[in-house]
Amino acid sequence: MSMELYILRHGLAGEFGDPRYPDDSQRPLTAEGKRKMLQAALGMKALGLSFDLAFASPYLRARQTAEIVCRQLDCMEILQITENLEPGRNPLKAINEINDRNLHSSRVLITGHEPFLSQLVSLLITGSNDPVVEMKKGALCKLEAEELKYGRCAELHWLLTGKQMGMIAK
């Protein structure tokens, strides 16, 4: 069974270094970030996307992003929070966790951060961690793989910015 892996970068968040958020993991989406993610989620809905399994980084901005999407696509019950999607983590651990929990799922959403996500996409489509794509805030890409593994195993089907997904919703 092939897998569709959807990789989503969190939306626009509070500025890094803002004294209101001394702990980077607690930076929330801004009001604009929430509005744009809602539009992107509506675009995902218009595209007919659905997920069997969803993972998000525990960082507040990534959780909020995943929750906005999962609420719109009626899949909150499948959302799982994992430290393996935190910035600076080893992609192998994320891949292993997805595989460990992905017994019957063919459409998986992961929500996280840069540069981790670009490195993960690059690893899966080229076998190298050197980024070949740039995941802008709110961007979503679709990969397909027969088997998810560390290294070249997937094909990039598309990459949309949050703005493009929002335009689809209109």
Image (tube, rainbow, N blue to C red):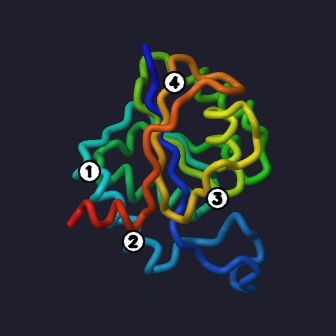
In this view of the protein, which residue sits in the foreground, 123 or 95? 123
Mark 3, residue position: 59
- What secondary structure is marked by label 4? strand
Task: Name the residue type under label 4.
Answer: Ala
**N-terminal label among 4 and 3:** 3
Figure disc tally: 4
Distance (Cα) linking label 1 and label 3: 24 Å
Left-right relation of 22 to 155: right
Q: State which mark lies toward you, 4 or 3.
A: 4
**N-terminal label among 3 and 2:** 2
In this view, 159 is above or below 21: above
Q: State which mark lies toward you, 4 or 1.
A: 4
Mark 1, residue position: 45
In this view of the protein, which residue sits in the foreground, 10 or 144? 144
Query: Are dots 1 and 2 in contact, CB under 8 Å?
Result: no
Distance (Cα) linking label 4 and label 2: 29 Å
**N-terminal label among 4 and 1:** 1
